[in-house]
Image (cartoon, grey):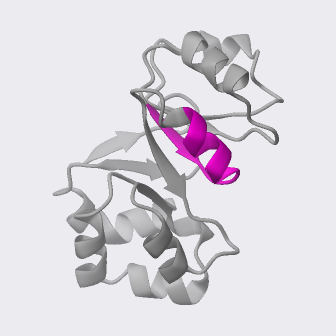
Amino acid sequence: MKLTKMGTDYVTISEENINDLTLQAISKIHIIKLDFINPTREIINSIMMLYPKTNRYIISDNIRIYNSILKMTAKKYYVENNEIDGLITFLRKNNKIFINVNKLTEHDKWFILDDVILADLLNNIEVIQLSRYDFNLFEHILIKWNGNVIIEK
């Protein structure tokens, strides 16, 4: 398991902070969540120029637009679940997924946070986000995993 710290290793970039010099001063951001209302090829290319060491991105909306732009790059990107779509529909539709447990319904969270289910899920994903409480409960499983764990502040 690799712990990925929010705010330094993992940041969200949108129209509001695209020119934030504090973010640009971070030597290497491991994962960037692209959260633009109207993403364009020019905006995405500018992000890749501003953060050349970042090779992994997370998207959660405008998926078709981001997909058409990012598939032409050598960058890896994951689709994040949201509060609206059901978990099963989300898992079926997306190959490269980022599970944000904090955005699951109580029922889906209860299902995912079972030792056997979580261990199986981790075999098929590379990044997961959890609360500190959930991380502490399942650290015994996550510690053996080779993916990235983001603990929500």
Place of residue 47 in the rendered image (x, y in percent of width and height, measured from the top left): 62, 20
Disc tally is 0
Looking at this view, is 21 or 44 the one in front?
A: 44
Q: Is residue 29 above or below residue 110?
A: above
Query: Is residue 65 part of the magenta span, yes or no?
Result: yes
Q: Which residues are magenta?
A: 56-69
Q: Is residue 123 above or below residue 45?
A: below
Point out the residue furthest to the left here.
144
Residue at image coords 62%, 19%: 45
Occupied quadrant, residue 143: bottom left
Looking at this view, is 22 or 70 the one in front?
A: 70
User: Would you say 11 lies left or right of 1 here?
Assistant: right
Place of residue 63 in the rendered image (x, y in percent of width and height, measured from the top left): 63, 52
User: Would you say 1 lies left or right of 54 here?
Assistant: left
Q: Is residue 32 above or below residue 89?
A: above
Occupied quadrant, residue 24: top right
Place of residue 37 in the rendered image (x, y in percent of width and height, measured from the top left): 81, 42
